[in-house]
Amino acid sequence: MQKNTSNAHANLNWDDLRYFLEVARTQRASGAAKRLGVDHTTVARRVRELEAALGTVLFDKSRADGFVLTAEGQRLVAYADAVETSVHSASEQFAGAAQSLSGHVRIGSTEGFGCFFLSPQLTRFTARHPGISIDLLPVPHFVSLSKREADMAITLERPERGQYVFTKLCDYRLRLYGTREYLEAHAPIGAVADLRNHAFIDYVADLAFSHELLYLNRTIPNVTARLCSTSVIAQYYAALQGNALAILPCFMGAPDPRLVPILPEEIVVTRHFWLSSREDLRKLRRVASLWDYLRAAADANRPFLMGESREMHYVDFQ
């Protein structure tokens, strides 16, 4: 017998959507409870009430995987996100500019930039704005803004289409690095041609999430990579073992005294990072403030990102 959906919708408690969204984001009732400041049994109860009101199952639940969205749950996320965005926008509009920043922001980033640059920078931002919580996703793949996997994203490529606001965040350089021990134990390197006799670390070509990452053979033709990884951090730690060379971002390689740039004037790659957000989210004060902070941090660290300085700087930003 079909459920009376009109009665179900009439009894729907829209406040339950807050609980639903937090569970969808954390995949754990305990994680959602911590964010919401309630007991995890309250979260589980509110989710059950929402499922009963809608007459559908929103999560597949297991001890191993936690709360995983069903197809109906994924559909509801889009509506719940829109409600949340509207509520936050209205709250910010009527509360006035004097109110301290608060709320949650999730930012996706490339792996190396997220771990080596954004992570230390964001600790300063959250210390200044304790009402804001941030999820940083430094992952070796693209993060989807359209699916609300993140509110903001830092990518290697500019968004091609969609209702996004974007700007070029910064340029950065990569150079060839190796350890002193490696250089002492192997044939001297005086020119690019000498590199043909050396071992390299590189990306797994068919699994690279962007063609912008496939710079080894474009920069140094006819060389062999004995170890490949989808992770630039794995490449960094592999290079530190002193058995092969790797092209790494200067913001990773230059600050580490164990690594030496090799032919730094001849072997240099310049790439760009783009900062983007959905148009509706970009208007939120917490997103706008973080956006401006990241731009200021990138501008202040231009020499560091371009390999002209070993020292990272921090900005005093409201």
Image (cartoon, rainbow, N blue to C red):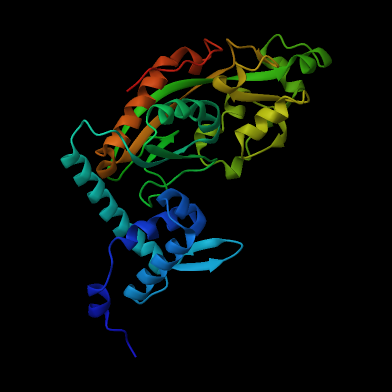
On-image quarter of the C terminus: top left
Residue at the image point whose x is 57% and y is 61% from the top: 65
Image position of 54 with respect to 243: above or below: below
Residue at the image point whose x is 47% and y is 29% from the top: 123
On-image quarter of the N terminus: bottom left
**Residue 30: x and y, percent?**
51, 56
**Residue 114: x and y, percent?**
51, 32
Image side of residue 225 versus residue 248, left or right: right
Count of all numbered marks drawn on residues in the image: 0
Q: Looking at the image, which is closer to me, 243 or 116? A: 116
Q: Which quarter of the picture shows residue 175?
A: top right
Q: Looking at the image, which is closer to me, 43 or 57? A: 43
**Residue 307: x and y, percent?**
53, 14
Image side of residue 60 versus residue 148, left or right: right
* Residue 200 seen in the current view: no
**Residue 215: x and y, percent?**
57, 28
Q: Looking at the image, which is closer to me, 46 or 273? A: 46
Residue at the image point whose x is 26% and y is 39% from the top: 284
